[in-house]
Image: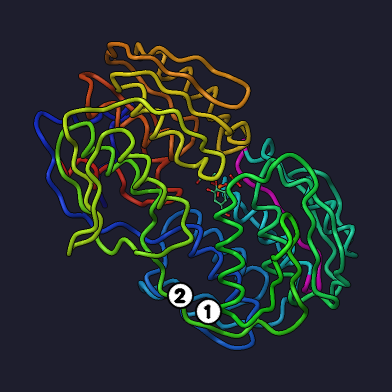
Amino acid sequence: MTAPLEDPWPAPRARGPIDSVITLPGSKSLTNRALVLAALADGPSVVRRALRSRDSLLMAGALTALGAVVDTSGDDWAVTPAAFDRDASIDVGLAGTVMRFVPPVAALGTGLVSFDGDPHMRQRPIGVILDALRAVGVTVEGDALPFRLHARGSVPGGVVTVDASSSSQFVSALLLAGARYDAGIDVRHDGKPLPSLPHVEMTVEMLREHGVGVDDAEPNRWVVAPGPIKAVDHVIEPDLSNAAPFLALAAVSGGRVTVRDWPTRTTQAGDALRGLLAQMGCDVSFTTDGLTVTGTGELSGIDADLHDVGELTPVVAALCALATSPSHLRGIGHIRGHETDRLAALASELTALGADVTEHADGLSLRPATLHGGTFHTYADHRMAHAGVVVGAAVDGVRVENVTTTSKTFIDFAPFWASLF
Ligand SMILES: O=C(O)C1=C[C@@H](OP(=O)(O)O)[C@@H](O)[C@H](O)C1
Ligand SMILES: C=C(OP(=O)(O)O)C(=O)O
């Protein structure tokens, strides 16, 4: 047993350039999609180098509760599909992927399935999925957590129109299970532009790897043909969004951080860090070990639309608060519905450390300021903790409250982070 961490946790301060080559845990988004597709597939398969963290264990637990067999004992998780033939009670924690992806899957079984999660999860958007399930023939009680659905052994499926402007996960959720619906599913988005589009592309690409026919030729429409989901083994890539604080550490310390096994082609939103960090003044290059970011001693502000990559905002905002020129982060109103209202939380916590931040309806503006120590609150949000430790690496006396909230996507993040100093 490791000793519990001090809370608030004194964030390590970089006293010189950090120079490290690191291996990161697997992607949450890839792991949880692979688990869902494996549980719906026509035979057993293995999710190799699966992420072991709260969100992925909650997904494994949810699929197990429905009836699938998920062996999480090693680094490679074996999944054996089985009939979803029972009543079940699902804990979604604070995992958007579990709350949104599992109900369309559960609807294929037989039984009464109840969903609940962490206190804040009751605030995160879900009604759109529940209404969409009703539209394709599923009986659902409730419009937010906690809710229940009565699974009747099959789902008619067909055409459904959703407003997915508050989360791309609404679309991904319907597509992931849709091939197993009697008529497949034809999802149309009608509303303000869909955020986090790379995540929908990840869903489509993985469905195709499983032999599922997906027509996405028309913008804002995805047609999934009915049919089996072929069992396929996956090797999970490192989580590129979770690379953000580590690459940011190279930037703020004027050091060099290499992330091993960075894919040269990926659907992960975190790949956008390469361009963002280069714009902020870092050298970014693929090397024999992986992706290397070198801090040049210069950290410029940026004007960036993060609509597609909203989950990168907390660390990017931390860097902007430390930059020597102003920044404007735009297109991210939807991240108010993430683990916490991230725009409000970032504005409040960075301001408390002396940053000059203005909160807008759909973004943040930050101007250069001299930051000081203090307690950085995380609101149970792993990426707020990432933002806090990045500021703490550059500023004396920063303490990060509830740093272990990072276990959502990275077990033992804090000791690993500290080991780099
Ligand atoms: O499908 C996924 O794996 C995700 C989609 C995105 O959600 P939103 O579209 O709600 O931003 C992203 O922010 C989240 O971290 C993971
Ligand atoms: C938005 C996020 O998570 P979730 O999958 O819970 O939506 C995130 O990890 O930044």
Q: Give the mark, 1 or 2, whose residue is nearer the N terminus.
A: 2
Percent x, y for residue 312?
Answer: 45, 40
Residue identified by numbered label 1: 79
Cβ(mark 2) to ligand 1 < 8 Å? no
Percent x, y for residue 313?
Answer: 46, 35
Q: Quadrant of the C terminus?
A: top left
373 shown above or below 125? above
Q: Identify which residue is drawn at 50% across, 24% down.
A: 345
Left or right, 21 with reference to 351: left
Query: Does 119 appear in magenta?
Result: yes
Mark 2 secondary-structure assignment: strand
Q: How crowded is mark 1: few (under 14 residues within 10 Å), some or many (20 or more)?
A: many
Residue at the farthest bottom position:
43
Q: Identify which residue is drawn at 24% across, 38% down.
A: 282
Mark 1 secondary-structure assignment: strand
Q: Identify which residue is drawn at 85% across, 72% down.
A: 155
Left or right, 304 with reference to 283: right
Q: Do the residues labelled 1 and 2 touch (CB within 8 Å)?
A: yes
Amino acid at the residue labelled 2: Val
Extent of the magenta region: 108-120
Say which mark, if any, is on residue 47.
2
Percent x, y for residue 106?
Answer: 73, 67
Query: Does 183 appear in magenta?
Result: no
Percent x, y for residue 252?
Answer: 22, 31
- Quadrant position of residue 327: top left
